[in-house]
Amino acid sequence: MARTRYHHFTLWLVVVLLAALVVTDLSPVLAAAKAKKDYGGIKFITIASGTGDWGLIGGKLADIINREIPGITATSIPGGATVNISRIERGEAQIGLVHSFLPYLAVKGENPYEEPHKKLRMMLSLWKGYAHVVVPKNSNIKDISDLVKAQYDVWNSKPGLGSQILNNAIFKAYGFTPEDIRKIGGVVHEIGLGDGANMMKDRRMDFLVFPVVYPYSMLIDIDTTVGMKLLPIDGEPRERLLQLLPGLVADSIPKGAYPDLKEDVPTVANFHQLACSSDLPDELVYDIMEAIVRNLPNLRDLSDSLKAISIDNALLGMEAEIHPGAVKFYKDSGMM
C-alpha cells in the first residue's frame, strides 16, 4: 500500500516538474494571472529558522517562496526549536523549523511552554536526527545510568534549546535529573554542542548527546582525536523516553556508520520539521508545499547533513494537527 502511494506521488511529481517546464513558455498574461492570487491579503511571511543547517534551510526556503509564490515576500530570521513555536503562536513568524518532540508539548502547554499553543500546524518532516550518546573510548561509563555513580563532566546544552529538552528527558527516563549529577560532585555544562565537543577532544568532557544524522563530521573528529563509544538507549528507559516525548521514534545507528562501530546501536530519533500558523490560508500553504517539494534537491545540496532530506519522511513524527492546505497537498499527491 505504501509503495502504491509513493508510486502515485512519483507520477504526480513528474507531472508537476513537466508542468513547471511548460509554464516557463507560457504567456506573460498567465504569469500575471498567477501573481494576482490574494491569499487573504497576506503579502509577507517570516520564517523562524536557527543556526547551522536550520539557518541554511530558512534562507533557502525564503528564496524559494520569493521566486515561486508571486506577491509573497519571505524573510528568514534566527531562532531555535522552542522559540520558533512560540513565535508562530504570537504571530511573529508564520513558518518555523521545529523538532518533532516539541509540538506535542506546545499543544498541551507542557514544559517548556507555559500555556497551550493553539495556532501551531504542521507542514512536513524533512530529515531525521539520531541521538548519538557519546563518551570517550576509554570511559568507565557503560550505561547512561552511570552518570550518577561517579563524578563526571556532563553536557546538557543551553537552557531553552530543544537539545536540552531532549537531554533532560533522557536523564528522566533513566531515573535521575541534572541536580542528581551535581549532588554527587559532577558538573553539568550548559553550553553549545560545539563547545562540548571541543572539551571532549581536550579530555575535559565525559558525556555528550548529538541528535544528528550519521556519519556526522564533528563526531568523526572526536573519534579521530580521542576515540569514542556510543551508548545505547534501549529497553524500558527507551519506552519511558518515547512516552515523555511523543514525536520521537525508536531507531538505531547502524554498524559501520563510524569506523569502529561494529554493531547497531539502539537509540531514538527525531524529525526536523516545518510548522506553520493556522492563520495562513489553505491555498497559500498548498502552493508553498508544492514549491518546497519541487525544490527538495536544492535543499539537499545545502550541506552534507541535509542530503538526508527525503519526501519519505514527510508525514512521519507528526504530533500536532497538519495544516488543511498541507493535507490537501498530500491527498492530491497520493501520499494520504
Image (cartoon, rainbow, N blue to C red):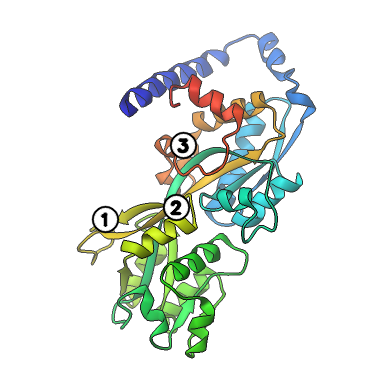
Q: Amino acid at mark 3?
A: Leu
**Measured Cα–Cα span from mark 3 to mark 2:** 13 Å
Residue 49 appears in view:
no
Q: Amino acid at mark 1?
A: Pro
Q: Amino acid at mark 2?
A: Leu
Q: Which residue is mark 3?
A: 315
Instruction: Please say if 38 is above or below 88.
Output: above
Label 2: how many Cα within 10 Å (few below 14, some 14–19, many 20+)? many
Q: Secondary structure at mark 2?
A: loop
Label 1: how many Cα within 10 Å (few below 14, some 14–19, many 20+)? some
Instruction: Please say if 8 is above or below 197.
Output: above
**Measured Cα–Cα span from mark 1 to mark 2:** 18 Å
Q: Which residue is mark 1?
A: 254
Instruction: Report the side of 280 relative to 308 (left or right).
Output: right
What residue is at 37 percent from the left and 73 percent from the top?
A: 144
Is residue 197 or residue 245 the one in the foreground?
245
What residue is at 71 percent from the left and 46 percent from the top?
A: 89
